[in-house]
Amino acid sequence: MPLAWGQPTGWLYTRPPVDTLPPERRSNNMRRIRSSGMKPELMVRRMLHRFGYRYRIHVSSLPGKPDIVFTRRRKAVFVHGCFWHQHTSCVDGRMPLTRREYWGPKLTGNVTRDATVQERLRALGWQIMVVWECECEAAWLPDALRDFLGSPRL
């Protein structure tokens, strides 16, 4: 006999996947999500600038238009959102429970494209660092960025 929503299954209750926002509000929220200049990216850029690094942003001549580019060093930093790029080590990187037929191909496509872009950049002789959204406030991030980039003056 199938369980109805809200019935106990062992020690927890099942819940229906519910979007608490009306469709028009959800649409407006999603429409405002931009691809660049978001808070995590700005945090990393400010941190790098404070340390004395100078960089270019979103260089369109490179595959994938990396978020932060150090051309003389041939190093690129991608700042990925945990949801959009499916960070497997983060709770925000999980697949939504609703509309899986839409989100599944979209998010797996993002992950596939990320891998392809990184492969192409490495083939061109670039080194890559990915900073996840959930790592932007981590205490170890400044040291990791310095280790990756080396001395601020080249």
Image (cartoon, helix red, strand yellow):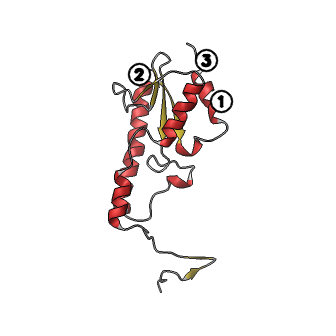
Distance from the alpha carbon under mark 3 to that under mark 1: 12 Å
Check disc 3 and report the residue beneath it: 151
x then y, percent, for residue 55: 48, 23
For residue 69, above or below residue 18: above
Q: Which residue is mark 1?
A: 143
Looking at the image, which is closer to me, 94 or 139?
139
Image coordinates for residue 32, horizontal then vertical, percent: 37, 50
Residue 136 in which image quadrant: top right
Cα–Cα span, label 3 and label 2: 23 Å
Q: Residue at x 67, y 38 (%)?
A: 139
Amino acid identity at mark 1: Asp
Cβ–Cβ below 8 Å for labels 3 and 2?
Answer: no
**Secondary structure at numbered mark 1:** helix
Identity of the amino acid at label 2?
Answer: Leu
Residue farthest bottom in this picture? 1
Q: Indicate the position of residue 118 as horizontal and vertical percent values.
A: 43, 32
Name the kind of residue labelled 3 in the image: Ser
Q: Nearer the viewer, mark 3 or mark 2?
A: 3
As helix, strand or loop, the secondary structure at mark 2 comes to loop
Mark 2 crowd level (few <14, some 14–19, many ≥20, 10 Å Cα):
few
Mark toward the viewer: 2 or 1: 1
Quadrant, the C terminus? top right
Can you give x and y, in whole percent of width and height, for residue 13 in the image?
57, 77
Residue 80 shown left or right of residue 32 in the figure = right
Indicate which disc residue 126 carries.
none
Identity of the residue drawn at 56% across and 55% down: 91
